Image (cartoon, helix red, strand yellow):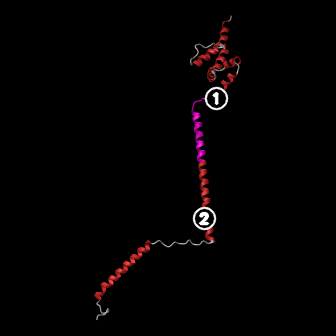
Amino acid sequence: MTSVLARSPARQRPLLLIMLTGAAALSAVAGVVGATAPPPAAAPAPQNRMAATIDDAIASRDRMATANMRALDLREQAAKAAQARLSATLAAKQQQDSGPAADPSAPDQYDALAKIYQAMKPAKAAPVFEALDLEVQYLVAKKMRERSTAMLLAAMSPSGAARLTMALAGRKPLRKEPDASRTSAIGATRSP
């Protein structure tokens, strides 16, 4: 009889090798199963008063920092808006200075004068209107209603009405009426 102990060492090696391979395979399978299994849920650590106080202080500091950032953003936006307004004002002022010398409120002045002369009686308005510069007469008459202009022209002297009519027609007067100072000077030289 041959006992297990009596077996030869050469025969024991393949058996040992098979058992070792089986153990390695089981170990590999157990490792894969353990790696794919989710870890056990970690329970939140119980907080003590000190941890709660620190968390509250951090949250409060974060809220203050957020509020400060919002305030800084608002200040920055206000500064940008003020700068834009100043730039626009400066550009408008430079454009006004470099632009034509005409006053932008001038059309409003002529509208107001036109309303005043329309409200006056033509007989009273004509002498005053005739004393105005021809350009002013023209601009005011253009702003007046046609009926009021016609009544004012009817009350003016014939030469003044003719000059204004020519200006309204877009033509220059054919002849100018002589100055009173030139006529008196001519008359003074002719008298013996």
Q: Residue at x 58, y 36 (%)?
A: 94
**Mark number, residue 58:** 2
Residue hosting label 1: 108
**For this rendering, which residue is in front, 4 or 191?**
4
Q: Quadrant of residue 55?
A: bottom right
Query: Identity of the amino acid at label 2?
Result: Ile
**Which residue of the protein is positioned furthest toward the top in this rendering?**
192
Query: Identity of the amino acid at label 1?
Result: Asp
- The magenta region covers 79-102
**For this rendering, which residue is in front, 57 or 180?**
57
**Which residue of the protein is positioned furthest toward the front in this rendering?**
1
Q: Residue at x 28, y 87 (%)?
A: 11
**For this rendering, which residue is in front, 111 or 127?**
111
Residue 10 vertical position relative to residue 114 in the rendered view, above or below:
below
Residue 8 vertical position relative to residue 78 in the rendered view, above or below:
below
**Residue 161, position as x, y percentages in the image:** 63, 15
**Residue 135, position as x, y percentages in the image:** 61, 21
Residue 96 magenta:
yes
Q: Residue at x 58, y 42 (%)?
A: 87
On the rendered structure, is 30 left or right of 183? left
On the rendered structure, is 124 left or right of 20? right
**Residue 104, position as x, y percentages in the image:** 61, 31
